Image (spheres, rainbow, N blue to C red):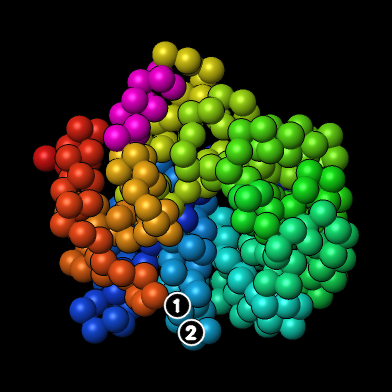
Amino acid sequence: MTLTGKDLHGVTVATVLPFDETGAIDWDGYAAVLEHCARPQTTDCVFVNGHAGEATALSDTERFEVIRRTRDHIGAGRPLLAGIIPTGLPDALRQAETARQAGADVAVIFPAEALGGGNTTTKAAVHLFERLAREVGMPLSHFQFPIASGFGLSTEVLSEVVQIPEVIAVKEGSATLLAYDENRRAIARSAPDTALLPSNFHWFFAQVALGGDGILSGLTSLVPELIAELWQASQAMDLARMRAANDRLYPVVRAVYGPAPVIDMHTRMKDGLQMMGVIKNAAPRLPLLPQTDALRATLRAALQTAGVLA
C-alpha cells in the first residue's frame, strides 16, 4: 500500500531484536517481542532495523528477514517502516530496494556518513532526498539525529527536505526542546501533511505537550501500555492524565536512558523484556556489551515502581 503522512499518526514502536546465546537472531523471541509491543490496542505502526534493532550489526540477509517476518506478523493493513543506514547514495538505493522487496512501506533514511561533522546546513541532504525520491519507488522518512551529533539537519534544510512529495514523515530526535519546536513549526508551514514523529526520549511529556503526530520510540518495545497512555492522554488534551502517565514512565525512562553510555539503552530494554519473561536472552551483539548487575537491578526496581513488573 502507498501511505501518506496521516497513515503514520499515533504510536510507532521501534522494535528491539533478541539474540540467542550464540549470537544468532532468536526468531521465536522476536515473535514474542512483536506480540508484546506491536498489538493494535497500543501500537499503530512498526519501525524495524533502526538503532533499537541493532541494524548496523546485521547482515543484509538478516535485515531482509526482519522486515519479512514483521510484515507476516502484523499483516498487510498496518504501516511498516524500515531503517536505511547508508554510507552514501548507492548503499541507500540498495538497502531501500531490499526493504521494499521484503515488505516495508516506508524507507526511513538515516544521515549518510559523508554528511556528518557539521555539513548538515548545506543543501546536500536536499539533493540526496531528491535523488532517492526519483529512484527508490516508495515513501520516505527522514531520521533527524541530535543536533549535537553533527548529523542533525538545520531547520532550513529540513524545511526543504519535507517539501519533496515522497517524504511523508520525519522521525524527530533533535534532542533539544528548542530545535524540536522550531522544526515542528517549520514542518507545519512547509509541508503540513508530513507526519512529525517525536522520538526525543528524555522528555516524552514535553514533546507531545508541544504537539506532534505521534510517538516513535524503542521504549514502546518494553512498556507499550505506558507510551500509549501518554499519547492517548495528549490526544484528549487531558493534562492531569498526561502528568499521571508521565509519572509512571519517569523511573523507567531514567533507568533506561540515564546511565552512560546512552547507546546501551536498547540493551536495557531487552534486559527488561527478559525480566518480564518475554525473551530468554538480553545480550546484544558486539560492539555493544551486556549490562552490569547493578544497572539491571535499578531497571528491575523501576519497572516494579511503574507497575509493569511484579
Where, by quadrant of the figure, is residue 287 drawn? bottom left
Q: Residue at x 29, y 35 (%)?
A: 251
The rendered magenta stretch, by its main secondary structure, is classed as: helix
Amino acid at the residue labelled 2: Ser
| Residue at the left extreme of this rendering | 310
The total of numbered circles placed on residues is: 2
Where, by quadrant of the figure, is residue 29 drawn? bottom left
Label 1 crowd bin: few (<14), some (14–19), many (20+), radius 10 Å: some
Asked if marks 2 and 1 touch (Cβ < 8 Å), the reply is no
Q: Residue at x 44, y 45 (%)?
A: 43
User: According to the image, label 1 marks what residue?
Assistant: 57
Looking at the rendering, in which quadrant would you find the C terminus? top left
The residue nearer to you, when weighing 161 against 261, is 261
In 3D space, how far apart are the residues under numbered discs 2 and 1 (Cα atoms)?
7 Å
Amino acid at the residue labelled 1: Ala
As helix, strand or loop, the secondary structure at mark 1 comes to: helix
User: According to the image, label 2 marks what residue?
Assistant: 59
Q: Position of residue 291 (x, y in %)?
A: 25, 61
Where, by quadrant of the figure, is residue 235 drawn? top right
- Residue 243 highlighted magenta (yes or no): yes
Q: Residue at x 78, y 40 (%)?
A: 187
Looking at the rendering, in which quadrant would you find the N terminus? bottom right
The residue nearer to you, when weighing 154 against 3, is 154
Label at residue 151: none
Q: Is residue 131 visible?
A: yes
Which range of residues does the magenta coloring cover? Answer: 241-251
Q: Position of residue 220 (x, y in %)?
A: 40, 47
